[in-house]
Amino acid sequence: MISIKSEREIKLMREAGMLNYLTHEEIRKHIRAGVKTKDLDKVARDFISSHNATLSCLNYEGYPASICVSINDEVVHGIPSSRRLANGDIVSIDFTVRLNGYESDSARTYIVGEVPKEVKALVENTKNALYEGIKQVRPGARIGDISNAIETFANMHGLSVVEELVGHGIGTEMHEDPDVPNFGAKGKGPVLKEGMVIAIEPMLNLGKKDVCMLDDDWTIVTEDGSPSAHFEHTVAVTKNGYKILTGEIENGEKEI
């Protein structure tokens, strides 16, 4: 069932989203060659603890860390470890912050040092695909409008769309209805209504779309070993358009 949030609830989700944004900004300071991915997990955990909030990934269906750290061909759900980032890596950081009973979900892909131009374009265009999807959010639009905008943009830039993993509704739970695929047809799927809150999260590959799971039962990688990028925002449907709940104030408070 799709839930409609009140103005009070969206305000609380915006507070959780702002803390999510600030946590990414704190992690970003530590993204460099040589850092262990488990150290990034600790940075996030310490920062969130100091703000009396929690990171919902920890122990979610058995997940053993506070954030997901996915490197290069790892699409999502990479488990932090003693692995060190290296020059030329791209690393996707994904986590959910819970504050005052409400969730906020966001992901970014960071570049470590210098990468080939096609990898840099992958990262930039995955981020741009996210915003192409967000532009479709308004009352009366359909989930398929978001999905189609992301897929169309990805295809225009020679990128493939991971189909097994999708965005989702969000609120008092990390994952709520409806699913928000990154591919599909315009005019299809649930109708967007004021008060709905969804997490939009394109996962795009430089190679083929096919993915598989590693033996840790969490990490999803591209089958062909190609790099993958991931960006995500939590977005509320407003009377006149949308509000990004996990962005900085300048962008996050803007409606269309």
Image (tube, rainbow, N blue to C red):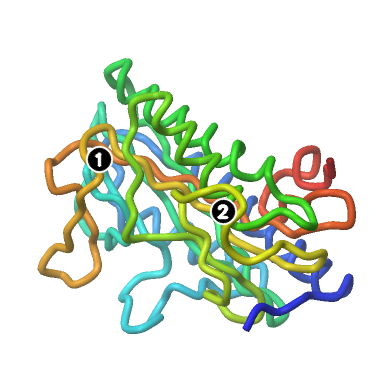
Q: Which mark is residue 144?
A: 2
In this picture, is 5 found above or below 45? below
Q: Please, which residue is most extreme toward the top here?
A: 117
Q: Nearer the viewer, residue 187 or 60?
A: 187
Q: Amino acid at mark 1?
A: Asn
Q: Residue at x 25, y 27 (%)?
A: 88
In this picture, is 54 found above or below 44? below
Percent x, y of residue 111: 38, 31
Q: Which mark is residue 72?
A: 1
Q: Residue at x 79, y 71 (%)?
A: 12
Q: Residue at x 23, y 62 (%)?
A: 219
Asked whether, in this view, residue 189 is left or right of residue 251, the answer is left
Q: Amino acid at mark 2?
A: Gly
**Snapshot quadrant of residue 71:** top left
Percent x, y of residue 211: 20, 53
Q: Secondary structure at mark 2?
A: helix
Q: Residue at x 22, y 43 (%)?
A: 73
**Snapshot quadrant of residue 85:** top left
**Snapshot quadrant of residue 191:** bottom right
| Whether residue 26 is visible | no
Q: Residues within 10 Å of mark 1 (few under 14, many from 20)?
A: many
